[in-house]
Image (spheres, rainbow, N blue to C red):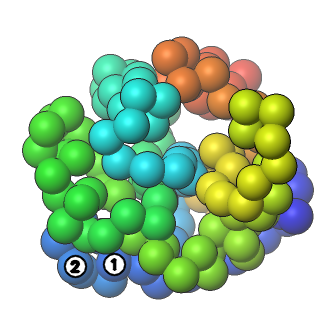
Amino acid sequence: MIEVGSEAPDFILPDENGNSVRLSDARGSIAILYFYPKDNTPGCTKEACSLRDSIEDLKGLGATVIGISPDSSASHLRFIGKHSLPFHLLSDEDHHVMEMYGAYGEKMMYGKKTVGVIRTTYIIGRDGKVLRVFRKVNTATHGDDVRKALEELR
């Protein structure tokens, strides 16, 4: 599992347009890397819209938002269009990056053990080091929670 202070592993994944995005290309700015289970589901939509609604504050604090789920690029493009999301969504269909970041595996869902995406957010500093990890995410307030964390890290 990746912890605060460790180097964020680099990766390349396709975005909503099928273009390759490399995490290290975000060096020099703060990256908000959030992993979520599925486009257009209630919790994931709340989380994405919460980040969308906080985007100006996050940008003002020097941050770029990047979402990752196992959905296809085409699904991401529809999700972005439907909810006017002003950030890239990357497709990790084989869960490789999610596994690398500890955001895929066994979890409890409705009292049952299951395997899937573990909703997790990383704040990655300008130097590529992990500054903060959210392992418990309140989808409705996540944008504001991330903004507050960025302000505390200043």
Q: Is residue 116 visible?
A: yes
Of residue 4 and residue 44, the one placed in the foreground of this image is 44
Compared with residue 112, is residue 20 higher up or lower down, i.e. above or below?
A: below
Q: Residue at x 83, y 49 (%)?
A: 113
Q: Secondary structure at mark 1?
A: strand
Q: Please state if 62 lies on the left or on the right of 49 as rendered.
A: right
| Badge 2 amino acid | Gly
Which residue in the protein does label 2 denote? 18
Rendered location of residue 91, percent (x, y): 39, 70
Which residue in the protein does label 1 denote? 14
Of residue 16 and residue 43, the one placed in the foreground of this image is 43
Q: Residue furthest front?
A: 112
| Badge 1 amino acid | Pro
Q: Secondary structure at mark 2?
A: loop
Q: Quadrant of the C terminus?
A: top right
Q: Residue at x 15, y 52 (%)?
A: 78
Badges 2 and 1: C-beta atoms under 8 Å apart? yes
Of residue 154 and residue 129, the one placed in the foreground of this image is 129
Q: Residues within 10 Å of mark 1 (few under 14, many from 20)?
A: some
Rendered location of residue 114, percent (x, y): 75, 54
Q: Please state if 81 lies on the left or on the right of 80 as rendered.
A: left
Q: Residue at x 47, y 43 (%)?
A: 63
